[in-house]
């Protein structure tokens, strides 16, 4: 379910439901059921308690002590991996899950946890295969595994199979609120809004403080052109939402609906932000979406004479329209306007910082571009938002400066955050992997790019690189 409407801002709109699905794929803490020395059990139990209370460093030490006593303890490696997963270190999490699987190849907790890592990395096929194997080992009777697999399938746009696994999760666990919500999201993606509404309402009946389900209900009512019900749903979501980033997104939806209702009640079907001389934000957005950047700039310049001049999003849109005209003079003007957007938003408008970094690159100001990217990434962390395009641009900038390892890391983060929606990051990472003499990984990334963008701008180049690297 896409929570972001098309915007005049340059940027990748990662849907909130994808974020929620990602967060809902919970890794599994292995409960020791094997025969270990008493001391090993003590360290496993102590580590598990520390892990659950968020004391990751202490938990890590306990699991490492268990491994020192018993190097063949899959539970310890699994749970050690979990301490890294919880702190965002996917590489070390994956390495420890793999060690657990080397000891016990069919260890379900580590199969499931490794699938969660692959999901976060945007490797949906790998994640799906791991979840399917875990399900077979669980005799297809684990509702959480069905749910996790359904999330992967939905985000990979395989809606029919996702529906099957959500329904199986519900059959096995009828009060599984998240599965009803996920099924509703799937129906929304299929534009089956009535069934989407039914499932999301069922999720809310099972979990009355379910912020994400109320948010989804708002999206559904909006799609059904029922703004009053949508507004009520968004307000309920806001009441229960604890994530500041999601809260801001919900407030944005509420503001959009209230403005629309105000225009309807006054008989005005245009944007409320109309300046003397004509022109409105809707017209500007439409011109930008159809790549008529010069005309969009003219409309926005008219808007700038009115109250829009106090809106950071206005300056961001104007800067973007100028930047996309591929003129050095326009790029310099874009820098000035994007700086205004950043200033008026007190640095919170991540899109403006991203666009500003792009403008710096366009004018050859690489150091300023790198610093602006860092600021955008830090702001995204503060707001608990994903910013895959910023990480991708950061990789481009670091590659230009000769920092290949830094660039590779930035591209990897971009891929993980984009959840399959930024194919070019695979291509960019492949180029760097070649320079780092990691040909096998490069081939895999070129193939990932071709899978996601078979007719993309770089598809022919990617095919040639794969053929060359594989000696064909």
Image (cartoon, rainbow, N blue to C red):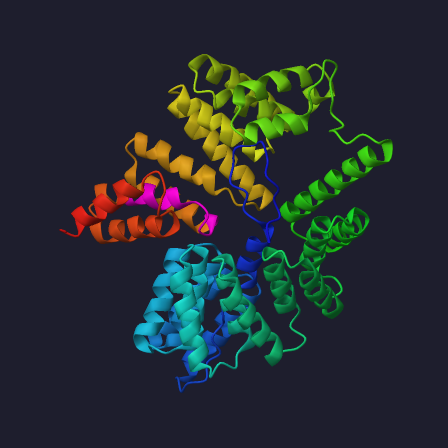
| Image vertical order of residue 428 relative to residue 318, above or below | below
Asked if residue 418 is among those painted magenta in the image, a careful observer would answer: yes
- Residue 50 appears in the figure: no
- Along the line of sight, the residue nearer the viewer: 380 or 261: 261
- Along the line of sight, the residue nearer the viewer: 360 or 136: 136
Instruction: Locate residue 339, reporting x and y percent.
Output: 56, 21
Q: On the picture, is 402 further left or further right than 211?
A: left
| Image vertical order of residue 69 relative to residue 64, above or below | below
Which quadrant is home to the N terminus? bottom right
Instruction: Locate residue 318, reporting x and y percent.
Output: 58, 22
Q: Considering the whole magenta stretch, tell me its main secondary structure.
A: helix
The residue furthest right is 265
Question: So how many labels did they put on this image?
Answer: 0
Residue drawn at x 71%, y 43% is 253
Q: On the picture, is 249 further left or further right than 163?
A: right
Residue drawn at x 60%, y 16% is 298
Instruction: Locate residue 319, reporting x and y percent.
Output: 55, 22
Residue drawn at x 32%, y 39% is 458
- Residue 146 appears in the figure: yes
Q: Which residues are magenta?
A: 417-430
Instruction: Locate residue 172, reporting x and y percent.
Output: 59, 80
| Image vertical order of residue 410 relative to residue 190, above or below | above
- Along the line of sight, the residue nearer the viewer: 65 or 240: 240
Asked if residue 56 is among those painted magenta in the image, a careful observer would answer: no
């Amino acid at each position: 379910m896409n929570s972001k409407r098309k915007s005049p801002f340059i940027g990748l709109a990662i849907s909130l439901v994808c974020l929620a699905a990602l967060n809902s794929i919970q890794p599994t803490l292995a409960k020791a059921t094997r025969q270990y020395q008493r001391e090993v059990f003590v360290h496993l139990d102590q580590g598990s308690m520390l892990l659950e209370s968020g004391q990751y460093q202490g938990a890590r030490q306990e699991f490492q002590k268990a491994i020192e006593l018993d190097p063949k303890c899959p539970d310890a490696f699994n749970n050690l991996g979990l301490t890294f997963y919880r702190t965002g270190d996917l590489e070390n999490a994956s390495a420890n899950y793999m060690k657990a699987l080397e000891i016990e190849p069919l260890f379900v907790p580590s199969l499931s946890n490794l699938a969660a890592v692959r999901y976060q990395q945007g490797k949906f096929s790998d994640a799906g295969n791991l979840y399917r194997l875990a399900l077979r080992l669980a005799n297809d009777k684990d509702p959480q595994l069905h749910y996790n697999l359904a999330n992967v399938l939905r985000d990979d746009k395989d809606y029919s199979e996702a529906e099957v696994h959500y329904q199986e999760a519900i059959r096995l666990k009828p009060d599984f609120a998240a599965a009803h919500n996920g099924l509703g999201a799937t129906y929304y993606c299929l534009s089956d809004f009535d069934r989407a509404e039914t499932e999301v309402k069922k999720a809310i009946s099972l979990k009355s403080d379910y912020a994400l389900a109320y948010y989804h209900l708002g999206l559904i009512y909006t799609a059904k052109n029922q703004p009053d019900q949508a507004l009520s749903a968004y307000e309920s979501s806001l009441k229960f939402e604890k994530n500041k980033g999601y809260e801001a997104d919900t407030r944005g939806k509420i503001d959009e609906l209230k403005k629309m209702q105000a225009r309807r009640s006054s008989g005005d079907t245009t944007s409320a932000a109309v300046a003397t001389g004509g022109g409105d934000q809707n017209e500007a957005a439409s011109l930008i979406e159809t790549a008529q950047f010069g005309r969009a700039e003219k409309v926005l310049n008219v808007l700038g004479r009115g109250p829009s001049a106090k809106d950071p999003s206005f300056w961001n849109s104007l800067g973007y329209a100028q930047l996309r005209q591929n003129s050095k003079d326009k790029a310099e003007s874009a820098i000035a306007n994007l700086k205004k957007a950043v200033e008026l938003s007190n640095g919170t408008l991540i899109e403006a910082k991203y666009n500003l970094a792009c403008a710096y690159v366009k004018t050859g100001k690489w150091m300023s571009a790198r610093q602006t990217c860092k600021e955008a990434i830090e702001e995204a962390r503060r707001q608990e938002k994903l910013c895959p395009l910023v990480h991708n641009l950061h990789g481009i900038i670091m590659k230009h400066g000769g920092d290949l390892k830094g660039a590779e890391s930035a591209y990897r983060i971009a891929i993980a955050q984009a959840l399959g929606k930024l194919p070019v990051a695979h291509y960019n990472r492949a180029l760097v992997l070649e320079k780092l003499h990691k040909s096998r990984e490069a081939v895999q990334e070129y193939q990932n790019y071709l899978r996601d963008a078979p007719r993309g701008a770089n598809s022919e180049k990617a095919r040639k690189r794969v053929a060359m690297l594989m000696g064909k």
